[in-house]
Amino acid sequence: MDEKTRAQVGGPRDPREGLEAVVALRRTLEALEAAQVENAIIAGWSWARIAEVLGVSKQAVHKKHAGRIRDKYPGEPPRRRGT
Amino acid sequence: MMLIRFTNRSRKSVEAAFEEARMLGHDSVGDEDLLLGILRAGEGVAAEALSSLGITLEEAREESEEMLSDALSSIGISLEEIRREAGDAFEMRMPQGRRLPLSPRAKNALVGARKEMRGLQDDYLGTEHVLLGILSNEDGTAVRMLAGMGVSPEALEDRLFELRGRAAG
């Protein structure tokens, strides 16, 4: 693609840069989802409510996140005090 | 994974690469993770060459995060703001249960390592061969990561052969 065409359709100067941004975003998205689900659980939200906002089934969100959160907070389910 | 003729040290460095990849939230083990693995395992000629050029595991991890942050910036996203918004719960780490595959570049690096071993007529595959295999991909993430830390593949190769003259592994 020459400069002129690129200017018309947009996009990064270097395809690799564009593709690497996708990888970076995917990694970050996964980490952000994990963090916000954890935050919601700590805030006292149920899996059903989290799933509803994420637009996925309760089973899906539980399967993806429950084990990790349980490992991180062994024993009592985490609850933020005062909420 | 087939790690035929790998020494204990080079085997450990590959195992450490999987740990590093998981820690950094990578969904596969990349060539840069193999490099980090060598630093994490911290033994052998390759680790010695890297540290003699002033490269530490901490610095390499920071460089890796900076590359992630730069890639996000290029599409207008601030990693710092995401961190601030998501709070302490935000970490790039991959959950333990998930198995990570080797990326195509990492596979190439290990194939390259075997070629280096043959080319040098060695009968073991040490950390130096793994590092040479990583460096053989000039377009790889590891080579760019090293460049970001001010080390060229040529300088690193020279140091590697210098050290190899004295010890192997």
Image: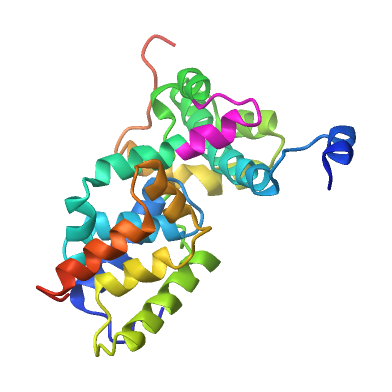
In depth, the one of B56 and A67 nearer the eye is: B56
In depth, the one of B54 and A31 nearer the eye is: B54
**Quadrant assignment, res A53:** top right
Residue A55 is a magenta residue: no
Residue A32 visible: no
Horizontally, residue B86 falls left or right of residue A1, namely left
Horizontally, residue B83 falls left or right of residue B38, namely right
Residue B70 is a magenta residue: yes
For the point 26% across and 64% down, which residue is it? B158
Horizontally, residue A32 falls left or right of residue B94, namely right
Magenta segment main secondary structure: helix
For the point 89% across and 40% down, which residue is it? A5
In depth, the one of B95 and A42 nearer the eye is: B95
Up-down relation of residue A66 to residue A52 (above or below): below
The image shows residue B9 at horizontal and vertical percentages of 20, 71
Magenta-tinted stretch:
B67-79
Up-down relation of residue B104 to residue A74 (above or below): below
Residue A55 visible: yes
